[in-house]
Structure formats: C-alpha cells, structure tokens
C-alpha cells in the first residue's frame, strides 16, 4: 500500500472514530442544520488563518466558536426561529469567507481543496492533529455524555434535576466546532457535515442503546472511508465525495434492510 493511501486511511479512521459518537447527538437533537452552518463558517476561519498567519485549524475553530456564541445570544432574544438565524449566519459567513480568500492576491489558495477536502494529501502532522484532537474531543464528550442524553430526552426535566443545560449545550456546540476544525482538511468544508450525520443515521436502524449506536456509527464511518478511498483510487475520482457517496450507500442499505425485514 502506498504511503499516501495509508495516511489517508488512518486519517479517515481517526475522523470516523470522532464523528460517529458526536454525530449521534446531532441526529438525536436534530442539529444537522447547525452542523452545516458551522461547516460553512470554516471557510471564514481559513481566511482568518491566512490573514493572521496562524494555523488554519485554529482560525477555523475561532470562527466556528464565534458563530456558536452569536447564535446562542440571538436565540435568547427569541425574535426569530433558530433555522432562520442559522440560515442568515451560515450563508453570511460562507460568503464573507469566499470574498476574503479571493482578495488575498499574494496567496495561491486551493479553494476547491478546502471546500471538498484532499484526504490523499494529509501529512504526518495532520494525523497527529486528528488523533490528539480526536482523543480530546472524545474525552470531552464522555464528560458530558449522561447530561447530554438527559437534555436530549427531556430538557425541562433535566434542568429540574439540576443538569446545567446551558453549559452542556454550549460545550457540545464548541465540541462540534472543534471536530469540524480538525476534520476539515480530509472531507472538506461542504462535506464534513455528511460524516457527522450519515453514518449515525445508518447506524440508528440497528441500535437499541445510545452507546450501541455510537459504536455502529464509528464502524459505518470506517467502512465509508475505506470504500470511498478504494473508489477514489479505482476510478480516479475525488476522495472526499467518494467517501460521502459510500456512506450514503450504507444509509440506503440500512433502510432497505429495515423495509425488507418489516415485510418479512
């Protein structure tokens, strides 16, 4: 196996291990649009990284955290629905990011690479970011796991029982932002949300407990990465979209299996 293929596979597995459990809560809490909004904001973070000469992941993380905090403040006013606020913020951030990147005449920026990812070009440093950052993200998720499940099941009851709902929700939003920052280079800004949603959605059909769904989501993500990389090499197609298509096939198969089992 070529070194770049091995690094891509290891990087994709690392991302799948993190996005599986985090994505389960995105599916349960119906936060897909929020994840998509954060992903759109990542391009603004890339522009910030280039402008201030810092690591692009740190710029992405700063931009995503900023959007999460602004959203929380606007939600407390209760003047507009959350989906409307997300639409305004995400498209504004994406547009500003594209304009900012296009105005950087002294830099040759691979805009398509950031939008759709380039998993075949990841380095050993990227792998270090993915696995150390992923371990930190999983530790943070484990810390709020029970409280987050309680809020997901019944927020008012969880609050009455003493669960710090605002703090847990803020921590989870920041966690999503962190995962997007470390995984952006592999799958791309426009496709990273799919890895947070599709494998958990496919795993949901076969899971009886939250923990079981998280494990199955990780397995579905790993299978998607392996199949997507194989398809990319076999057909000389973009790796990021191939991974997403492979995950979508698993999702369709899971639904087909359920329908056939129901008929049986």
Image (tube, rainbow, N blue to C red):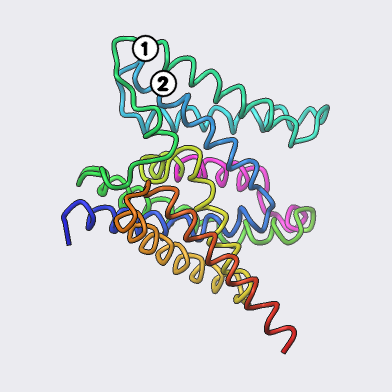
The numbered dot on residue 129 is none
What residue appears at the point 39 percent right and 58 percent down from the top-left corner? Answer: 228
**Which residue is at the far bottom?**
264
Give residue 40's quadrant in the image.
top right
Q: Which residue is mark 2?
A: 47
Decide whether the magenta segment is chiefly helix, strand or loop.
Answer: helix
Residue 208, given in percent of the width and then of the height, sits at 63, 77
Between 118 and 142, the one nearer to me in the picture: 118
What residue appears at the point 38 percent right and 52 percent down from the top-left corner? Answer: 134
Which region is colored magenta?
A: 158-179
- Secondary structure category for the residue under label 2: helix
Instruction: Give the Cα distance between marks 2 and 1.
Output: 9 Å
Q: Which residue is mark 1?
A: 104
Give residue 121's quadrant in the image.
top left
Between 130 and 101, the one nearer to me in the picture: 101
Q: Residues within 10 Å of mark 2 (few under 14, many from 20)?
A: many
- Secondary structure category for the residue under label 1: loop
Find out whether residue 59 is within the magenta segment.
no
Give the quadrant of the N terminus. Answer: bottom left
Residue 64, given in percent of the width and then of the height, sits at 51, 32
Q: Relative to 27, does residue 45 appear above or below in the rendering?
A: above
What residue appears at the point 29 percent right and 16 percent down from the top-left corner? Answer: 107
Q: In the image, 21: left or right of 162? A: left
Between 191 and 154, the one nearer to me in the picture: 191
Give the quadrant of the C terminus. Answer: bottom right
Find out whether residue 171 is within the magenta segment.
yes
Label 2 close to label 1 by CB (< 8 Å): yes
């Amino acid at each position: 196996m070529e070194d770049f293929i091995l690094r891509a596979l290891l990087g994709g597995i690392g991302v799948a291990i993190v996005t599986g459990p985090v994505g389960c809560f995105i599916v349960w809490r119906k936060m897909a649009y929020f994840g998509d909004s954060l992903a759109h904001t990542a391009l603004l973070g890339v522009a910030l990284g280039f402008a201030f000469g810092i690591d692009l992941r740190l710029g992405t993380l700063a931009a995503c955290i900023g959007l999460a905090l602004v959203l929380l403040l606007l939600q407390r006013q209760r003047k507009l629905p959350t989906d409307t606020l997300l639409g305004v913020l995400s498209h504004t951030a994406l547009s500003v990011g594209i304009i900012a990147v296009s105005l950087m005449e002294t830099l040759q920026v691979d805009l398509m690479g950031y939008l759709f990812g380039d998993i075949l070009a990841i380095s050993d440093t990227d792998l270090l970011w993915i696995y150390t950052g992923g371990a930190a993200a999983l530790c943070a998720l484990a810390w709020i796991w029970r409280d987050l499940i309680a809020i997901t099941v019944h927020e008012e009851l969880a609050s009455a029982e003493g669960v710090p709902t605002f703090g847990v929700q803020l921590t989870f939003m920041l966690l999503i932002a962190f995962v997007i920052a470390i995984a952006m280079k592999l799958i791309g800004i426009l496709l990273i949300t799919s890895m947070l949603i599709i494998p958990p959605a496919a795993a949901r059909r076969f899971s009886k407990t939250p923990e079981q769904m998280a494990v199955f989501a990780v397995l579905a993500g790993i299978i998607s990465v392996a199949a997507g990389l194989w398809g990319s090499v076999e057909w000389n197609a973009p790796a990021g979209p191939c991974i997403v298509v492979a995950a979508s096939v698993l999702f369709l198969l899971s639904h087909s299996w359920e329908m056939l089992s129901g008929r049986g």
